[in-house]
Amino acid sequence: MNKIIPEKIETERLLLKLISLDYKEDIFKEFSPEITVYMSPRPAESIQETINFINTSTKEILEGKNLQVVILNKETNEFLGCGGLHNLDTKTPELGIWIKKSAHGHGYGVEAMNAVKNWADKNIDYEYIVYPVVDKNISSRKIPESMGGKIEREYEETTGLGQKVNMLEYRIYPQ
């Protein structure tokens, strides 16, 4: 597997940059209970938890295990959210993303995750990409569907906020 992690990925509207402590305040503020309602991770209770997450992510980037990015508006440099491709050291890496509430409804998630998948298609050897999503999260389901992803598995999970949810696991195959 090629483990060359890019410093940035650009799209028409977005700049995806490797996560860094420069964004700790934005991540801490925007990764809220409202954003995480359908997610496994829970919001950080302190800025130190966010710093620990960023430091762990940076270590995993250096090890070639994780592509963890912040998503920025290319024109204004406004922080929009975080995303990544995790478990790069496996044949089934996993896409994940969150966009801050005030930036919902603009297609940023689809645009960012399609860019990450395009990078993966050119740079890593994988069988398929996993994209787990809560069945009720229609907006998030549009992301794997935009890449031709198909539901291959359903299971129950408890979110970081303690809610039981029905998960759909999409699989997205290389182009």
Image: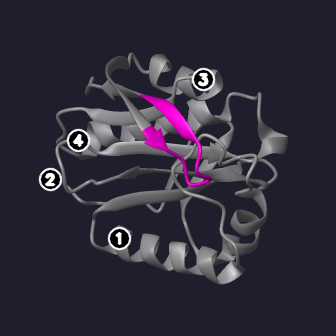
Amino acid type shown at disc 1: Glu
Answer with the quarter of the image where residue 10 lies. Answer: top right
Kindly identify the residue that appears in the image at 79 percent across and 43 percent down.
101
Mark 2 to mark 3: distance in Å?
35 Å
Amino acid type shown at disc 2: Met
Residue 118 vs 57, above or below: the answer is above
Mark 1 to mark 2: distance in Å?
15 Å
Mark 4 to mark 3: distance in Å?
24 Å
Nearest the camera: 40 or 95?
Answer: 40
| Residue at the outermost bottom position | 48
Query: x, y percentage for residue 77?
Result: 76, 56
Name the residue that disc number 4 marks. 92
Name the residue that disc number 3 marks. 136
Amino acid type shown at disc 3: Lys
Pointer 1 local density, CA inside 10 Å: few below 14, some 14–19, many at least 20: some
Which portion, as a residue range, is magenta?
Answer: 157-167
Secondary structure, mark 2, is loop
Residue 110 vs 10, above or below: the answer is above
Q: Closer to the camera: disc 4 or disc 2? A: 4
Mark 4 to mark 2: distance in Å?
12 Å
